[in-house]
Image (cartoon, rainbow, N blue to C red):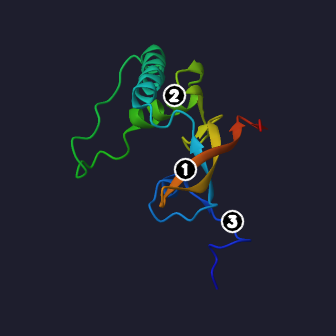
Amino acid sequence: MNMTGRGYVWVVTEQALSAGHVPSGAIGLKLVNASDEDAHITDSLYVLAMALKKLREEQNSTEPPPKDCNDTRGTWETGKKLFQYILEQVLKNGLTGKVAFDENGDRINAEYDVINIQEVNKTGHPLKNHIRVGQYKYNKVLS
């Protein structure tokens, strides 16, 4: 059974979109600005700075983190609190769009392009092109 032929569609992960053997016709989501590392670093530093500022404002002293995995002091409470402050941060106009997190630390409100892999055969050499066929932004389908 040829499940990569006519009448079949593969829905793949973002990483699989770039694989050399991804079948033509595959569809996947690709994070907008995913390859702009500078923008992601800038946004993450703003989020971290805001969380550290809140930690400092609300807690005068912090306990140092464990020196290694064998430290027997138990859970690093300051680290847990810092993580909670990070989750609370929102960048409305970050370089990568709106930056906010759910309770697990996963980014919400991200923007994705819907990509379709299409094979183009030029001069006898098949090439697989990433064609944007739609966009998902926040909770709205744009196209």
Classed neighbour count for the residue bearing mark 3: other residues with Cα under 10 Å, few (<14), some (14–19), many (≥20) = some
Secondary element at image label 1: strand
Nearer to the camera, 90 or 62: 90
Looking at the image, tell me whether mark 2 or mark 1 is earlier in sequence order.
2
Classed neighbour count for the residue bearing mark 1: other residues with Cα under 10 Å, few (<14), some (14–19), many (≥20) = few
Q: Residue furthest bottom?
A: 1
Residue 75, numbered label:
none
Secondary element at image label 3: loop
Q: Whole-Å distance between the Cαs marked 2 and 1?
A: 41 Å
Note whether 130 is above or below 97 in the view shown: below
What's the residue at 27%, 49% (across, down)? 72
Looking at the image, tell me whether mark 3 or mark 1 is earlier in sequence order.
3
Examine the image and state in which quarter residue 27 appears: bottom right
Q: Which residue is mark 1?
A: 129
Residue 38, image x and y in percent? 40, 26
Q: Amino acid at mark 3?
A: Val
